[in-house]
Image (spheres, rainbow, N blue to C red):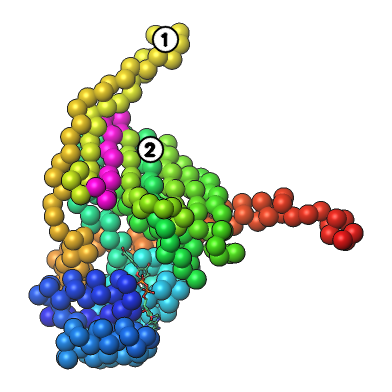
Amino acid sequence: MIRVGVCGFGYWGPNLCRNFAVNPGFRVTAISDRREAARAKAASLGSDIRLYEEAHDLVDDPNVDAVVVATPAASHFDLARRALARFKHVLVEKPMCVSAEEGAELVALADRVRRVLMVDHTYVFHGAVRKIEELMRTGALGAVSYFDSLRVNLGLFQPDMNVLWDLAPHDFSILDHLFGEEPDEIEATGHCHVNPVHPDIAYITMHFPSSMIAHFSLSWMSPVKVRRIAIGGANQMVVWDDLNQEEKLKIYDSGIEFQPEDERSVIVPAYRIGDVHSPRIPPGEPLAAIIGHFGNVIAGRETSRLDGHHGLRVVRMLEKTQAVLNANLAARDQRRAPPASSVASR
Ligand SMILES: NC(=O)c1ccc[n+]([C@@H]2O[C@H](COP(=O)([O-])OP(=O)(O)OC[C@H]3O[C@@H](n4cnc5c(N)ncnc54)[C@H](O)[C@@H]3O)[C@@H](O)[C@H]2O)c1
């Protein structure tokens, strides 16, 4: 039985606790949150759960074998490092940390102390991703030419985080898991409408060595929530609409075939419009599967698919994208700034 301590009992912490509670390999023994109301809510989970105000104190509790970090992203590195340094296994929320330098330190520390460092990139364990993986493995999809994600909703605006770091970890982790390649070129633009320094809309395009192109529309300014990913393969195309309860995944047996160049005078592609089918996605919460995987990795029964290296690659993609976004926003601000002479003459 692995004794778990959960840091952060805001929105996501209770979901983690609920899933740990039904896994026989774990027992939640401690919860920490700075907010009294959150601790009061956590108290209702059982009188045997120790409550802490400060996450540091939970991490130091000798009765905790594994620490779950579900506090805001800026605190992930500090808490994960402290837990690993005390020889505890760590499941850290997305994003693993806020810089590649921090990520590399966590990976090295986990290796040194021989403890599990895992990131909760929940969607990697989604049934739709598993199905897409199967289509790729069997060759049914064919060579992938594009990955197009629309991930928008209204808010939640966060004071210390922008829309890129909030929403893109989902897409970047799916990409890393499915394709295992990092982009060689990134384009990114966006806008800060609400918070003057944190973009709430971002449009990102990535180019990969395999010649796949990926595009991400991320927004906290959309009146409707959309979670839709389209993946185009040479043989089939897939649309995953995560909010569609009946037909989450649709597989289109469609494609475009070009004649060899020497046999054509104009580009007339042959459109192949075939059947559409919607496979059943096995029920079950991805988070429950991740927690099961965490237990199996700790026990040495499985190799982690969400280890620190994977978490670091995602953070690196976020960091590189942020740098491009920053440069574009700064250049635009400069273009829009009034010329120095007009300021002086006011
Ligand atoms: N995997 C997913 O699908 C998913 C979904 C939502 C959120 N998340 C991640 O979970 C993390 C938390 O997000 P949230 O939406 O629950 O945020 P939240 O603000 O609702 O909750 C965070 C809680 O942590 C507490 N806290 C902060 N610092 C603390 C400290 N040092 N000690 C004790 N308590 C502390 C706060 O009081 C707050 O209640 C973020 O990293 C977020 O990206 C992941």
Query: In this rendering, does residue 58 appear at all?
Result: no
Reply yes or no: does residue 333 show up in magenta. Answer: no
Which quarter of the frame holds ligand 1?
A: bottom left
Q: Element at badge 2?
A: strand
Q: Nearer the viewer, residue 101 or 129?
A: 129
Q: Quadrant of residue 27?
A: bottom left
Range drawn in magenta: 233-244
The amino acid type, in three-letter code, at marker 1 is Arg
9, above or below 61, in the image: above
Q: Which mark is residue 264?
A: 1
291, above or below 87, in the image: above
The amino acid type, in three-letter code, at marker 2 is Tyr
Q: Earlier in the sequence, mark 1 or mark 2?
A: 2
Q: Quadrant of residue 258?
A: top left
Residue drawn at x 9%, y 75% as measured from the top left:
24
> What is the x, y in percent for residue 172?
38, 53
> What is the x, y in percent for residue 335?
72, 50
